[in-house]
Image: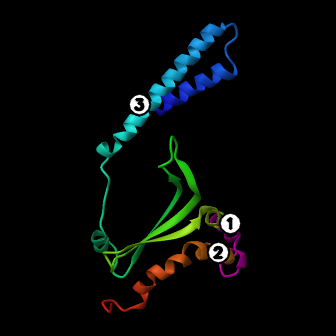
């Protein structure tokens, strides 16, 4: 369906931007109207198929107790999610209410009843820091060790400050107390 939509949109663009020579204005209007109609029908078919997805693909759900069975004792699972926030209550269209951001869901295997969400804020500084760190890793390929290259360590510390440090208070308890001492 996506390919059909791409093709009909391409046809519509061609008819609008560079119509075939010798085509009468009435024929051009007829072809554009047919393309617009086909585009709408294809979009509707895609929307209907997407609406049926929950029935076709049941959501995979888990609970924290299940995590406790597969992860080592006294460990945590950090699930980083990047998203745009929208307000779907506005008329006609969803309105983006916040720039792209990251949150982390913290699940402790020792406290199976609690899921903690930590908001990391804007995605741009995080994405930029990760990109800078990746670009600095090329230096390690040239024979420098991580201990010898202050730039790589500095960039790694920036990533740590942005993506790990805000989460530490949520996971610190799991690592401070002896197993079973809670």
Near mark 1 (Cα within 10 A), the count class, few <14, some 14-19 or many ≥20, is: some
Place of residue 164 in the rendered image (x, y in percent of width and height, measured from the top left): 54, 75
Q: Is residue 150 above or below residue 23?
A: below
Magenta-highlighted residues: 130-153
Q: Quadrant of the N terminus?
A: top left
Residue at position x 52%, y 57% in the image: 83
Residue at position x 50%, y 43% in the image: 91
Residue corresponding to mark 3: 45
Upstream in sequence: badge 2 or badge 1: 1
Element marked by disc 2: helix
Element marked by disc 3: helix
Near mark 2 (Cα within 10 A), the count class, few <14, some 14-19 or many ≥20, is: some
Task: Indicate the quadrant where residue 143 lies.
Answer: bottom right
**Relative to 161, 178 lies left or right:** left
Residue at position x 50%, y 31% in the image: 3
**Relative to 72, 32 lies left or right:** right
Near mark 3 (Cα within 10 A), the count class, few <14, some 14-19 or many ≥20, is: few
Task: Inspect the magenta stretch and tell me whether residue 132 lies in it.
Answer: yes
Marks 3, 1: nearer the viewer:
3
Marks 2, 3: nearer the viewer:
3
Asked whether 151 or 45 is in front, the reply is 45
């Amino acid at each position: 369906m996506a390919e059909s939509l791409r093709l009909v949109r391409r046809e519509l663009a061609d008819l609008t931007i560079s119509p075939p020579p010798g085509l009468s204005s009435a024929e051009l209007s007829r072809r554009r109207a047919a393309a617009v109609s086909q585009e709408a029908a294809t979009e509707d078919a895609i929307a209907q198929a997407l609406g049926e997805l929950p029935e076709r693909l049941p959501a995979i759900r888990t609970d924290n107790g299940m995590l406790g069975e597969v992860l080592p004792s006294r460990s945590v699972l950090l699930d980083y999610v990047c998203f745009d926030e929208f307000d779907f209550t506005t008329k006609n269209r969803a309105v983006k209410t916040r720039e792209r951001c990251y949150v982390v869901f913290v699940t402790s295997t020792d406290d199976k009843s609690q899921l903690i969400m930590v908001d990391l804020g804007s995605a741009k500084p995080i994405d930029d820091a990760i990109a800078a760190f990746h670009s600095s890793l090329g230096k390690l390929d040239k024979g420098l060790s991580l201990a010898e290259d202050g730039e790589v360590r500095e960039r790694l510390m920036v990533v740590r400050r942005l993506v790990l440090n805000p989460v530490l208070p949520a996971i610190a308890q799991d690592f401070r107390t002896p197993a079973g001492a809670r």
